[in-house]
Image (cartoon, coloured by chain):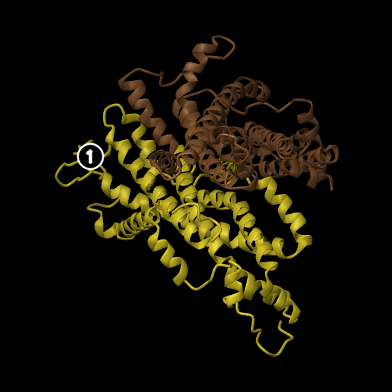
Amino acid sequence: MARYLLTRLWQSLVTVVISSIVVFVGVRMLPGDPAVSLAGEEASPARLAAVRAELGLDQPIWVQYAKFVWTYLHGDFGRSLRTGTPVGEMLRTTLPVTLWLAAYALVIAVVLGLTLGVIAERFRGRWPEWGANGVAMVGLSVPSFWLGLLAILLLSVQHHVFPASGYVPMTQNPVDALYHLTLPAVILAIALAAVVMRQTRASMIATMQSDFIRTDRAKGLGRRRVLLKYGVRNSLIVVVTIVGLQLGGLISGAVVTESIFGLPGFGKLTLNSVFTRDYPVIEAVVLLITVGYVVINLAVDVLYSVLNPRIRVAGDA
Amino acid sequence: MTVLGSPVPTDPTAPEALADGVPSPRPRRWWRGLLRHRTGMVGAVLLALVVLAALLAPVLAPYGPTDVHFDTPFQKPGTVGFPLGTDNLGRDVLSRMLYGARASLEVGILAVVVSTVVGVPLGLVSGYWRRADAVVSRLTDVALAFPFLILAVGLAAIRGASLSNAVLALGIAHIPQMIRVVRGETLRIKATEFVVAAVAMNAGSLRIVGRHILPNCLSAIIVQATIIMPGAVLGEAVLSFLGLGIQPPQPSLGVMLSDAQQYLSKDAWLGVFPGVLIAIICLSFNLFGDGLRDSLDPASHDRK
C-alpha cells in the first residue's frame, strides 16, 4: 500500500511539473512582447533591452522558468494586468464559490445516479427501468446550459421559486447560500448523474449475476439485503472511478454554469481572463486547475484502492 | 516488410476466430443485430433525418443563415415566411438552425477525425509494444479527464477563438479515450490464437498490427466514434455559447442560444428551438451508438 501511494505521488509530481512547463511555455508563446507593451511601441532598442533585463527576459529560458516556479511556490501569482489586484487574492475570493457549487453538484449527482441505477436493476424489464434509462438518456443528450436557461426562465423569472442569480457566502448564511446554489448545482449535476446512473446499472447487473451473489441468495439472504449490501457496495467502486473520469466534465460544466447563473466563481474568472487577455490570471488559473485536477485524481486513486483491494495488491506486487 | 513468401493464411474471419467471440469485420452479422435493436433504430432514423437536413441546408433553408430582415424582428413561430420565427435582427430561425446543425456535425466529425488519427496509432502501439505502453499509458492516464474547456480556454488565449480551435480542443480532449479503447482491443486481439499463429509463421510486427489487429479493432473504434460525436457536438455548443468557438454572425446552435439569452423573458422560443435541436442531435447519436455497441460487442447483451 505504502509503495503504491509513493508511486502515485511521484507520478502526480511529475505531472504537475510537466503541466507547469506547458503553461509556462504556452504563455510565452502568446502573441505580443511584454517588453514592447511595457516600454511602448517606439522605445529605443536600448530601452527595450533595459526593460527586458528588468523583467528577466534576457536570461536563459530555464532560469526564467526556475524564477517562475520560485515565485509560485512562495504564493506569489503576480498581479492582474487589468485591475492590478494580486492574482492570489482573486483566487481566494472566487474559489470557494466554485468548490461549493461542485461539491453540491457532486452530492446530487451521486445520490440521484446511484438511486436511479439501483432502481433500474431492481425492476429490470419493467417500467421503472425504462423510465430510469430514458431519464439518463435525456440527461446525457440535453445540453445542461440550455436546461439552465430554461430553468431560470421557468423557475426564476416566471414563478420565482429560485433566485436567477446571486451568491451568498456559505460562512454568512448557510441556508440562504444553499438555496442560491441549488438551481445551479442541479443543472451542473444532471449530466454527471446520467453517467453515474448508466454505469451503476451496468455494474449492478454484472454484480447481481455473479457467483457470490448467487451463493448469498442460496444461503437464504433476502434479495433486497443482497442488493443493498453487496450489489451497491461493488457499484461504489465504479462510481468512484466515474467521478474521477468525469472530473474534467465537472470543471468545464462549472465554468458554463457560473456564466449562466452569474456566480462570481472561478469559472467566471477564467472566462473573463481570456476575454480580457489577462495573462497572469490565465497562467494562474490554468495551472491551478491542472494541479487541483491532479490532486483530486490522486485522491480518487487512493479511495479506489481502499474500496477495491485487488488494485492494492497489484500495486504492491 | 514480409520476409515470408506465401500470403499468411490466417484470415481474421476464420471460424475459430469467430467462435472466440472476435467480432467479424463482415457487416452482415451486426447489421442484423442493429436492425432488431429498437432504440438503436430510432436513433438511426433520427440521425439520418438530422444528417439529411444538415446536408440539404442550402436547399431547405428559406433564407441565408446571416440574412437580416430589420423590418421583421421577433416574429413568432408560425409566421408566414418564417416557420420558426425570426430573431432580434430579423434573421430566420429555421435557416440559422439548419446551418447551425451543419456546423455542429462538422465540428463533431472533425473532432472524431482528430482523435482517431492520433488516438488509433498510439493505441495500437501502446497495446502491441509493452515498452511504448509504459509511456503512452502514463500520459493517457493523466490526460484522460482533463477539462476540454481549459484546453479551449488556453487555445483561445493563444490563437483567438475560432471554429478550428474548438475542433482542436475537442479533438485533443477525446484522444485519450480513443487510445484507451484501441489499446484494450489490441491487448485482447494480440492474445487470440490467430495472432499467435501469425507470429509463429514469422509475420512481421507491422503486418500483424496492420492486417490482423487493426481490422479487428474497427468495431470498437466505430463505437467510440459514436460516443465522441455527441460529446463534441455538446462541446461545440458550449464553446460557441461562451464565445470561445464559432464566432457570430456565423450560425451555430450555441451562438443562437447565446444570442437568445437576453431576450428569453419576452421571446422564449428563440432559446427553445436551438436547444431542442442540439438535444435531438446528441440523442440520435447516443441511441444509435448504444444500439451499435450492443450489436457489435458480443459481451454486452444486457439490453434486449
**Residue furthest to the top:** A172
Q: Please state which of residues A297 and A123 is positioned toward the viewer in this rendering.
A: A123
- Image quadrant where one finds the N terminus of chain A: top right
Residue closest to the eye, B272 or A53: B272
Point out residue B166 in the picture as x, y percentages from the top left corner.
Answer: 51, 48
User: As drawn, is B12 to the left or to the right of B74?
Assistant: right
State which chain is coloured brown: A
Image coordinates for residue A269, horizontal then vertical, percent = 56, 28
**Position in image of residue B25 (x %, y %):** 53, 71
Tell me which chain the residue with mark 1 is part of. Answer: B
Check disc 1 and report the residue beneath it. Answer: B70
Q: Is residue A29 left or right of residue A60?
A: left
Q: Position of residue B211 (x, y in %)?
A: 62, 76
Going 32% across and 30% down the picture, which residue do you hit?
A: B264
Q: Secondary structure at mark 1?
A: loop
- Above or below residue A17? Residue B112 is below
